Amino acid sequence: MRRQPFVAGNWKMNGSCVTNQKLVAELLESLGDSSAAAFAVCVPHPYLDQVSRLLAGSCLALGAQDVSPHESGAYTGEVAASMLLDFACRYVIVGHSERRSMHAESDALVARKFGAARAAGLVPLLCLGETLAERQAGDTLPVLFRQLQAVLDAHGVAALADAVLAYEPVWAIGTGLTAAPEQAQAVHQALRQYVAERDPGVAAGLRIVYGGSVKAGNAAQLFAQPDIDGGLIGGASLDAKEFLAICQAANI
Ligand code: PGA
């Protein structure tokens, strides 16, 4: 099955009104109106309004980096999925390893966030990834399956039909170390197989993107792998030229 490639930038806690305006203008100038691939930028919450206006009517979609598991109420500092929709967000990252490690987000909490995003009609970008210690202990797949299973337990395999999985080995994020294309492919294939054992149709259509030090120089090789459907791009998404080259690599 031909899956539409997908590339999303994850700006993390970077940007300002001035730099956002410049970066988005540069991206929109070069991204054509029609493309075989889908593209998005996931921006910090305070800039959703600004970037939403800048992207209106363009082929670049808007995403957020986190969402509350709650619908509304007394949750100081939290941002609800319905609020993200108010700013025309289409995507939201859930379970990024920086939130799992720095904010102690459990598999169960990530699954609740995934559910909140879906219930509101957002597309969750569900991040899965093993640490270096887990990889060295030979636990890569058990860790990824455990993280994925929490979502399957809570929402069923059909919930993945509207989602994107992002395989992001923690040891490759922001480190300059990238999983070799074959190494990443093996993991993507295993994840797809895990889903296929539960629903072959969902597995065949599921986009599984790779994240972790993707750059213009390594994107094409990664995206050429049969089970790698694009990328989630951190550092390189802050540089228009780099990000555009990565988008180009997915647009095949
Ligand atoms: P990186 O980050 O591209 O800077 O490694 C990827 C991510 O954390 O999504």
Image (cartoon, rainbow, N blue to C red):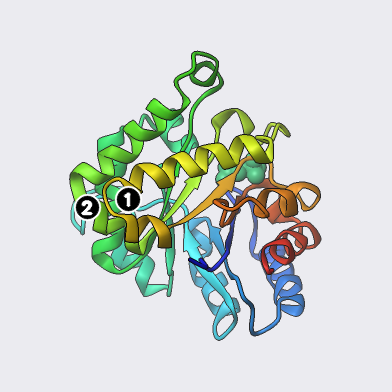
* Residue 203 percent coordinates (x, y): 38, 55
Residue drawn at 70 percent across, 55 percent down: 238
Q: Which mark is residue 70?
A: 2
State whether residue 223 is above or below residue 167: below
Above or below, 168 relative to 73: above
Q: Earlier in the sequence, mark 2 or mark 1?
A: 2
Amino acid at circle 1? Glu
Judging from the image, what secondary structure is the residue with disc 1 in? loop
Quadrant observed for ligand 1 in the rendered image: top right
Is 75 above or below relative to 26?
A: above
Q: Amino acid at mark 2?
A: His
Circle 2: element type: loop
In the image, which disc is placed on residue 78? 1
Q: CA distance from mark 2 to mark 1?
A: 8 Å
Local packing at callout 1 (Cα closer than 10 Å; few below 14, some 14-19, many 20+) is some
The reply to whether callout 2 and callout 1 are in contact (CB within 8 Å) is yes
- Residue 173 visible in the current orientation: no
Q: Is residue 1 above or below residue 110?
A: below
Name the foreground residue: 74 vs 165: 165
Label 2 or label 1, whichever lies nearer to me, is: 2
Res 38 quadrant in image: bottom right
